[in-house]
Image (spheres, rainbow, N blue to C red):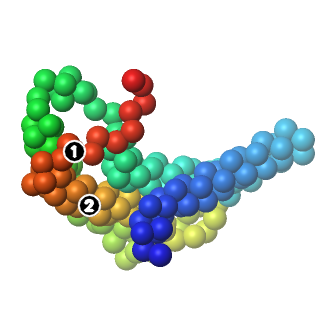
Amino acid sequence: MLALIDRNAERWALLVFYTMLVVTMAVEVIRREVFAYSSIWGEEVVRYAFIYLVWIGAASAVRERAHIRIDVLFALVSERGKALLYILGDLVMLVVAVLAVYWSYESVAVSWRFGSVSHGLRISLVWFLAAVPIGFALMIFRLIQSLVRDVADLRAGRPPYEGARLFD
């Protein structure tokens, strides 16, 4: 069960937020064009669903090594060199992600302390501002998994996991 969640958690969350975004946007377009009426809540739902979509998608891309990268160096080094470059890249990204969680938590805490709410939905802004620390926390989790996998591959002499290539 945990392996299934590990493999598909981001996919299902992305599906939920993408569906919410598309359905709400379609409803709002129909309301605006057919009935000459629009709501402020529809715009907010789309905006916040997109924000969650981006941050969860970034964590998913870390898991699959699907972020944009320059492969020129990887073609010039051995398999061991590739593994070391991947480990270095993951460590740098881990430091950035930890700093981002730390700094983004402050805005969530301020919103929590003062009880800020969104204009249209009248829901606490904490739920929306939390997208950033949640996304980076997921990235930290996936980066740790990646580091463990890369170190194990390096020790076993296996080539590092490079993810699926978009163009080959």
Asked if disc 1 and disc 2 are in contact, CB closer than 8 Å, the reply is: no
The answer to whether residue 40 of the structure is visible from this angle is no
Looking at the picture, tell me which residue is in the foreground, 134 or 140: 140
User: The C terminus is located in which quarter?
Assistant: top left
Residue at left 14%, top 37%? 79
Badge 1 element: loop
Badge 2 element: helix
Q: Is residue 106 left or right of residue 116?
A: left
How crowded pointer 1 is (Cα within 10 Å; few <14, some 14-19, many 20+) is rated as: many
Looking at the picture, tell me which residue is in the foreground, 64 or 33: 64
Taking the view exactly as shown, the residue that stands out farthest to the right is 35
Disc assigned to residue 112: none
Disc assigned to residue 145: 2
- Asked which quadrant contains residue 80, the reply is top left
Q: Is residue 135 above or below residue 92?
A: below
Residue 44 image offset from top left, x and y in percent:
61, 54
Residue 141 image offset from top left, x and y in percent:
29, 63
Q: Is residue 75 left or right of residue 166?
A: left
Determine the CA span between mark 1 and mark 2: 13 Å
Which residue type does callout 2 highlight? Gln
Residue 10 image offset from top left, x and y in percent:
47, 59
Residue assigned mark 1: 160
Which residue type does callout 1 highlight? Pro
Q: Is residue 137 left or right of residue 51?
A: left
